[in-house]
C-alpha cells in the first residue's frame, strides 16, 4: 500500500528545496512509488517522499513545545555525554553521523538511554558514599568505645 495518495495533506520535515519549505503544508497530487516521487499541488516537479509526513501523523502538541523539549534533550546529551552537536548534525563516540532526518529519533532514544545510565551512575556514587560514611562511622564508634 502506498504511503501517500492524491489529496493527502503533507508537511515538509526536511531539506528546503525546490520551493518547498520545512514546516509548511502541501497537498499531494500523485505519489509515484516506482519512481519514489511525490508530486504536489502547484509544483511541477517530483519530490523525495522521505522529506514529508502526513499531516495526521504530526503530534497535536504545540510546535514550540515539541521543539523546546527536543532541544532540551539535545542540550542535555551534549552536556552530559560524548555526543557532539554541530551544524544540524549529530556525531556519537564512534563517529557515526546522523542527518536531520534521523536526528530526532536518535536524540530521543539516546537521551532516554543516557538518562538511565546517568541515574544509575548517580545511584552507585551515593551507595559508595554511604559505604564510606558507614566505615568512617564504624571507626569513630570504635575510637569512642575503645
Image: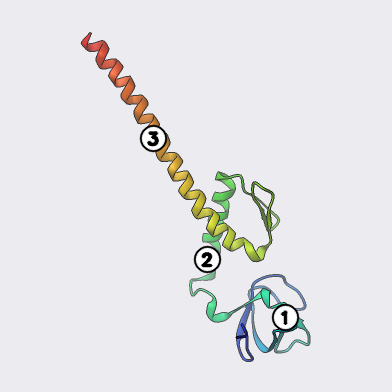
- Distance between the Cα atoms at labels 3 and 1? 54 Å
Q: Position of residue 140 (x, y in %)?
A: 28, 16
Q: Nearer the viewer, mark 1 or mark 2?
A: 1
Picture mark count: 3
At numbered mark 2, what does the secondary structure look like: helix, strand or loop?
helix
The quadrant in which the N terminus is found is: bottom right
- Based on the displayed image, in which of its 4 quarters is residue 101 positioned? bottom right
Q: Quadrant of residue 9?
A: bottom right
Answer whether labels 3 and 1 touch (C-beta < 8 Å): no
Residue drawn at x 40%, y 40% is 123
Q: Which residue is mark 3?
A: 126
How crowded pointer 1 is (Cα within 10 Å; few <14, some 14-19, many 20+) is rated as few
Which image quarter: residue 144?
A: top left
Determine which residue is flagged by label 2. 66
Q: Determine the secondary structure under disc 3.
A: helix
Label 2 vs 3, first from the N-terminus: 2
Circle nearer the N terminus (1, 2): 1
Residue 36's disc is 1
Q: What secondary structure is found at the residue carrying circle 1?
A: loop
Amino acid at each position: 500500500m502506498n504511503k501517500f495518495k492524491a489529496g493527502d495533506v503533507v508537511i515538509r520535515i526536511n531539506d528546503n528545496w525546490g520551493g518547498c519549505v520545512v514546516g509548511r503544508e502541501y497537498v499531494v497530487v500523485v505519489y509515484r512509488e516506482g519512481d519514489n516521487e511525490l508530486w504536489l499541488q502547484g509544483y511541477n516537479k517530483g519530490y523525495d517522499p522521505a522529506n514529508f509526513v502526513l499531516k495526521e501523523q504530526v503530534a497535536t502538541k504545540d510546535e514550540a513545545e515539541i521543539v523546546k523539549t527536543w532541544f532540551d534533550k539535545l542540550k542535555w546529551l551534549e552536556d552530559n555525554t560524548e555526543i557532539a552537536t554541530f551544524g544540524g548534525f549529530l556525531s556519537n563516540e564512534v563517529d557515526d553521523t546522523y542527518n536531520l532526518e534521523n536526528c530526532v529519533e536518535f536524540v530521543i532514544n539516546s537521551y532516554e538511554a543516557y538518562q538511565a545510565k546517568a541515574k544509575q551512575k548517580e545511584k552507585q556514587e551515593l551507595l559508595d558514599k554511604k559505604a564510606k560514611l558507614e566505615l568512617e562511622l564504624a571507626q569513630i564508634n570504635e575510637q569512642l568505645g575503645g
